[in-house]
Amino acid sequence: MDGQSVSESNGSDLPEDLRYQFGFGNHFSSEAIAGALPRGQNNPLVCPFGLYAEQISGTPFTAPRKQNQFSWLYRIKPSVTHEPFKPRVPSHGKLVSEFSQSNSSTNPTQLRWKPVEIPDSPTDFIDGLYTVCGAGSSFLRHGYAIHIKVLSDAFRYTANKSMDNCAFCNADGDFLIVPQKGRLSITTECGKLLVSPGEIVVLPQGFRFVVNLPDGPSRGYVAEIFGAHFQLPDLGPIGANGLASPRDFIVPVAWYEECLCPGYTIVQKFGGQLFTAKQDFSPFNVVAWYGNYVPYKYDLSKFCPVNTVLKDHADPSINTVLTAPTDKPGVALLDFAIFPPRWLVAEHTFRPPYYHRNCMSEFMGLIFGEYEAKADGFLPGGASLHSCMTPHGPDTKTFEATIARGEDVKPFRITNTMAFMFESCLMPRICPWAMESPSIDHDYYQCWVGLRSHFSPEKADDESQKLQNGPNGAAC
């Protein structure tokens, strides 16, 4: 597939436009110099222009063909030409990829964090990434982590400086990055991506990349999954169209630099630890590539929501953008779902999200605007965690305001909002620095304290009484 020009409103340090390809799961191909891709075979004796052929495999060789992911990279020097890896000094200390009693704890309480402050000292993407919670193990290839930056794991990140003379590589799993403040200019071995708040980017396991900050300080969220890759959810009775369309996913085109870079550092996350290796050239020396194992981004505003048009709610899974499945049908290692602008039209229905206890665990973030179930306290850049079977739902203000509007509520459109959820079947363990963070909201539980009883059997009308008592008039 040839790249197509996509105009980006870039900063002065970025090109006027970036060229992208479109699709999800395609076998793409791209060459920065015409003729750089070998024709008819993957690994000729001599590659065009004297390039080296190198394959990157995102699945085992023997994975079923429909699941097999790989790409061939044609590069000026192979990635193997570096000095031995050594533990990074200083170590990071707040990245976790194997969750146990020694580094994390369980807590069924509803948890919420306020937005993390941007640090005053220079902090790049690597040092600004820390794990909040997760489950499983990268060593066992099952789990997730959430960073405030699955198994899968989840992170949050804050950063205020670009990465200089170094590149990052995550050997543990795939990153799904959700920027909340500030654009990210990401250079990968497959090319460049500019990612804005309101977009997401997936950086698959093993790819080397650099994150630069065209707008200065940046903040966001990261989900990391171990032993799986994201895919589009099945649509079932919805049919062929709806939710996230494959045509709206964006993949870079080949871009390379050939330069001498003494002391260039590769920082590799391996088993949750950081290691460094020196080399004398840029890792972004791929002149051509083809395959289906690639970084990609997606604009959340292109999501096509599906909603109820008469009464009650569809479950929030109807908002799934991407899913990382387990071996059990319908059970996700990690789902990424969003709550975008949309119309609410249900009649005789409590329209905000319902009160809920869930066998899955839910980590939520807010990119911008307000979340419809929380009138106060849930801020852009903040987060909440409702673990397995922990009750949650609309706060007191939201409930009372909804009831006060009564039955005669016209359709209305939720605007200027973008909340999201990482949902996993695995019960999360929480890192101590997340529990001890100054941004944790110790008063979160109070948002429900004001919910009072509205129970009044004397006021029930005859019809509802008949429905409750059944045709024989006897209560169950």
Image: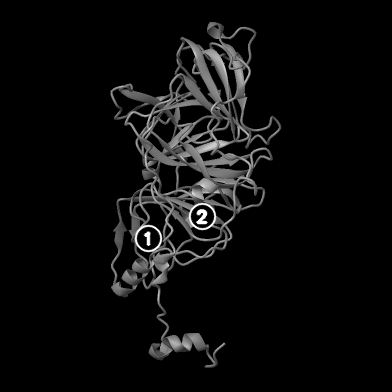
Q: Nearer the viewer, residue 108 or 325?
A: 108
Q: Is residue 432 visible?
A: yes
Is there CB contact under 8 Å for labels 1 and 2?
A: no
Q: Is residue 45 above or below residue 106?
A: above
> Which quadrant holds the C terminus?
bottom right
Task: Decide which of 119, 160 is in the foreground and name it.
Answer: 119
Cα–Cα gap, marks 1 and 2: 15 Å
Tell me what residue is drawn at x 57 percent, y 13 percent.
38
Of all residues shown, which one is farthest toward the bottom?
473
Q: Is residue 340 above or below residue 225?
A: below
From the top left corner, tell me how far across and down residue 379 is, in percent: 36, 52
Q: Residue at x 33, y 31 (%)?
A: 216
Q: Which residue is mark 1?
A: 374
Q: From the viewer's perspective, tell me whether residue 41 is left or right of residue 354.
A: right
Q: Secondary structure at mark 2?
A: strand
Query: Who's the residue at 45% across and 14% down the image?
Result: 257
Q: From the top left corner, tell me how far across and down residue 427 is, in percent.
A: 60, 54
Q: Amino acid at mark 1?
A: Lys
**Residue of label 2:** 362
Q: Position of residue 26 (x, y in %)?
A: 53, 32
Q: Secondary structure at mark 1?
A: loop
Amino acid carrying mark 2 in the image: Glu
Q: Is residue 394 left or right of residue 143?
A: left
Residue 150 visible to the viewer? no
Residue 168, position as x, y percentages in the image: 51, 27
Position of 53 relative to 389 (above/below): above
